[in-house]
Amino acid sequence: MAVTFDTPAASDGQGSVTVSCSPASGENFPIGSTSVTCTATDSLSRTGTCSFSVTVSRLPTVQRVKYLAFGDSNTQGEVSPPVSGVTFPTLFTKNAVVASAAWPTVLQQSLRGRYSSQSSSLVVSNFGLAGERARDARTRYQQALNSDRPEVVMILHGHNDITGGLDGAASTAAFEIEQMVSEARNRGMRVFLSTVLPARPGGNKAIAQLFIDDFNARMRIVASRQGVTLVDNYAALRTDVNRYIGVDGLHATEAGYTKIADTFFQAIQAALEVR
């Protein structure tokens, strides 16, 4: 890029003093550090020099710009109380979908902030659907891929399948999620597969720890077998579960959705940022 700088001031010379720099102000400088040397010459041809460095940094870019987030209410953005600016008539029976707090929305903001030169092209589409089970989601998932044609698919699903611990529910949901992963890979899409979220003890919708551990083990197997990136949101939110999971024990708080977005962001940065 072209870089301009002030000409260094000269003093103590005899007569007129000219100052020239190499490389000169206004020239194109390469990425990295370039040493500039400036020479002052007076009327008696005496010289003095100084030098300084000009550093040009490359704007960070990411290899893929179109993202699709697929999942249940914890992707759609259903927030358990308390929620800033939202009044709940019944604390434990009514949540609120807050689109601005949903992790796909927060992730899009983070991606656009980091990769500012690609900001207008970076899109994260939210295909979360409250109450959906992974075992019933295949048709909607394929429709989402067909309509949105993403370059990257992020999956956070399975909470509604495993909540009751029914026989075969976890294995069926894991099978369906693996089919989703395989479908995206077959289309040349990059996949980031998340573990399900931790439960907050005491919540009326909290999933038993045994069921969460079992399902997350299945997600790790799917990620390994399919060769995709595992995003461990369970571990990320487990560090402060009472802050990140709301009073119902199941849905993330606003802080929790921000944490989920950050966990996905770090995985995307590590895998897709141009080095």
Image (cartoon, rainbow, N blue to C red):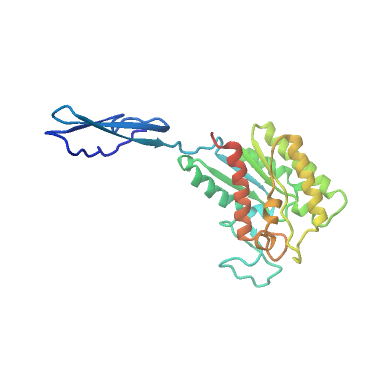
In the depicted structure, whether residue 176 falls above or below residue 165: above
- The x and y percentages for residue 241 are 69, 60
- The x and y percentages for residue 81 are 65, 66
Residue 116 appears in the figure:
yes
Residue depicted at x 55% and y 35%: 63
Q: Is residue 127 left or right of residue 116?
A: right
Residue 149 appears in the figure:
no
Quadrant of the rendered structure where residue 143 is? top right
Quadrant of the rendered structure where residue 258 is? bottom right
Residue farthest toward the right in the current orientation of the protein: 167
Q: Is residue 53 left or right of residue 253?
A: left
- Quadrant including the N terminus: top left
- The x and y percentages for residue 115 are 49, 42
Residue depicted at x 21% and y 38%: 10
Residue farthest toward the top in the current orientation of the protein: 45
- Quadrant including the C terminus: top right
Quadrant of the rendered structure where residue 19 is? top left
- The x and y percentages for residue 154 are 65, 43
Near-viewer residue (272 or 189): 272
